[in-house]
């Protein structure tokens, strides 16, 4: 495995962990799994993560955009794939030709999809998105039935599914999720009364898939949980889930500086005594944010980043690890010895959520894949 002798900074992803997390969700929910691999699989790398999720028992893949679905198809991934978001007119044709399932929420989209599908002599597969309270995408519940009737009658269109998305399933207080679920069930009822039963009904993100049995319907759509990251502080994952990602770098230089030396741009940190200082080739252009208070692990100990984070480098204070040498491994997310820095801790420090931390790891950071079973 090429790592510290080869790269400045890199991510290690354990694909067996992703497969295992998917199988846990499948067992716990008792329904099929659509593994959500949008945004480069939350930074983990879409193709390897998708293959691992399928190995773990996922039957479907969910993405945000047509381009993401086509990337999976180009890698010979032939399972059902749903684009859960917007598809532009220009890429509908290619999506339909590749058997990708599309989300729609209005009549104009339906007409376009039907038109392209007829031309291609291909049935387009569609899922109707209902906005039950996220207030993002979707047809209003009161308009869902008439659109569903049109989908059922449209030429060259297969009405494959209907879904909604929760705004607050990751909270202990489930009243909002419950209200959305009831609204969704009303819609399903009105469709059923009109003889319309889309084969795949779905609603649950990770938090709902794990903690809200009534929301599981035919298939669940977990994202964050398959990577072993907590849906929220209020809804942590059960203990048997594991994080799949580690973010590492290598120590490029170590030196001792006398008191009074300014560190990094702006000299915001000034040495107070003789201090051991290390330089690490990772910076904000890698997605390691230019925030105060960052910490990393070296020699199994947590040490502070001092001075400003640069574009490609940071400087750390090594007084706690006098034995550190150039070439040593530095951990930004993950564990080393008995110490650990989680994506959630980094998120707290940056004033955001773990989702944004992992999605923000830049494309230039190489992803290294391993299987713990190997
Ligand atoms: C991102 C997304 C998911 C997955 O959400 P997690 O909280 O990561 O489990 C499911 N459904 C839709 C529509 C999404 O956009």
Image: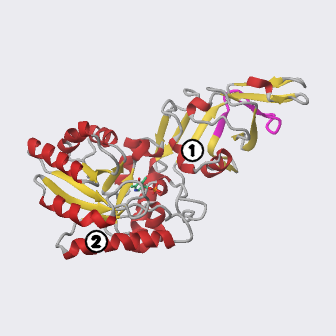
Residue 291, image quadrant: top right
Pinpoint residue 166: horizontal percent, then vertical percent. Answer: 44, 62
In magenta, the rendered stretch is 315-331
Q: Which residue position holds label 2? A: 188
Prevailing SS of the magenta stretch: loop
Along the line of sight, which residue is nearer the eye, 359 or 58? 359
The residue depicted at 74 percent of the width and 41 percent of the height is 293
The residue depicted at 49 percent of the width and 33 percent of the height is 366
Q: For the residue carrying disc 2, how many other residues have a C-alpha within 10 Å: few (<14), some (14-19), or many (20+)?
A: many
Task: Indicate whether residue 318 is drawn in magenta.
Answer: yes
Classify 29 as above or below 366. below
The residue depicted at 41 percent of the width and 54 percent of the height is 136
The answer to whether marks 2 and 1 mark residues whose Cβ atoms lie closer than 8 Å is no
Pinpoint residue 268: horizontal percent, then vertical percent. Answer: 79, 29
Residue 330, image quadrant: top right
Classify 109 as above or below 166. above
Pinpoint residue 333: horizontal percent, then vertical percent. Answer: 61, 44
Residue 190, image quadrant: bottom left
Confirm whether residue 255 shows in the render. no
Asked whether mark 2 lies closer than 8 Å to ligand 1, one says no
Along the line of sight, which residue is nearer the eye, 286 or 352? 352
Q: Which residue position holds label 1? A: 357
Outermost residue, front side: 142
Q: In the drawing, what numbered circle is on residue 200? A: none
Measure the alpha-carbon separation of dots 2 and 1: 36 Å
Q: For the residue carrying disc 1, how many other residues have a C-alpha within 10 Å: few (<14), some (14-19), or many (20+)?
A: many
Along the line of sight, which residue is nearer the eye, 279 or 152? 152
Classify 204 as above or below 299. below
Decide if residue 242 is on the left or right side of residue 203.
right
């Amino acid at each position: 495995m090429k790592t510290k002798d080869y790269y400045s900074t890199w991510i290690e992803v354990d694909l067996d962990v992703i497969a295992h997390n998917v199988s846990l969700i499948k067992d716990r929910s008792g329904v099929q799994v659509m593994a959500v691999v949008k945004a480069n699989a939350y930074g983990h790398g879409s193709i390897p993560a998708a293959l691992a999720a399928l190995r773990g028992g996922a039957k479907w893949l969910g993405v945000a955009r047509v381009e993401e679905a086509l990337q999976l198809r180009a890698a010979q991934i032939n399972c059902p794939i749903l684009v859960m978001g917007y598809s532009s007119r220009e890429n509908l044709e290619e999506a339909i030709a590749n058997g990708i399932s599309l989300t729609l929420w209005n009549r104009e989209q339906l007409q376009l999809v039907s038109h392209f599908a007829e031309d291609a002599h291909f049935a387009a597969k569609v899922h109707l998105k209902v906005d039950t309270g996220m207030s993002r995408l979707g047809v209003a519940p009161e308009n869902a039935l008439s659109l569903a009737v049109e989908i059922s009658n449209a030429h060259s269109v297969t009405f494959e599914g209907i879904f909604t998305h929760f705004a607050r399933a990751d909270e202990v207080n489930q009243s909002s999720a419950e209200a959305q679920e009831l609204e969704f069930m009303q819609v399903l009822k009105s469709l059923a009364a009109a003889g319309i039963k889309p084969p795949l009904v779905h609603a649950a993100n990770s938090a709902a898939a794990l903690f809200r049995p009534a929301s599981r319907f035919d298939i669940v759509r977990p994202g964050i949980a398959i990577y072993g990251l907590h849906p929220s502080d209020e809804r942590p994952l059960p203990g048997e889930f594991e994080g799949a990602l580690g973010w590492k770098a290598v120590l490029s230089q170590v030196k001792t500086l006398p008191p009074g030396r300014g560190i990094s741009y702006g000299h915001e940190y000034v040495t107070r005594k003789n201090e051991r200082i290390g330089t690490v080739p990772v910076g904000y252009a890698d997605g390691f944010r230019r925030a105060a208070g960052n910490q990393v692990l070296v020699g199994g100990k947590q040490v502070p980043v001092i001075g400003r984070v640069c574009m490609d480098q940071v400087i750390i204070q090594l007084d706690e690890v006098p034995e550190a040498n150039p070439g040593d491994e530095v951990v930004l997310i993950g564990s080393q010895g008995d110490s650990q820095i989680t994506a959630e801790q980094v998120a707290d420090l940056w004033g955001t959520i773990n989702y944004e931390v992992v999605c923000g790891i830049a494309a230039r950071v190489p992803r290294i894949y391993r299987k713990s079973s190997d």
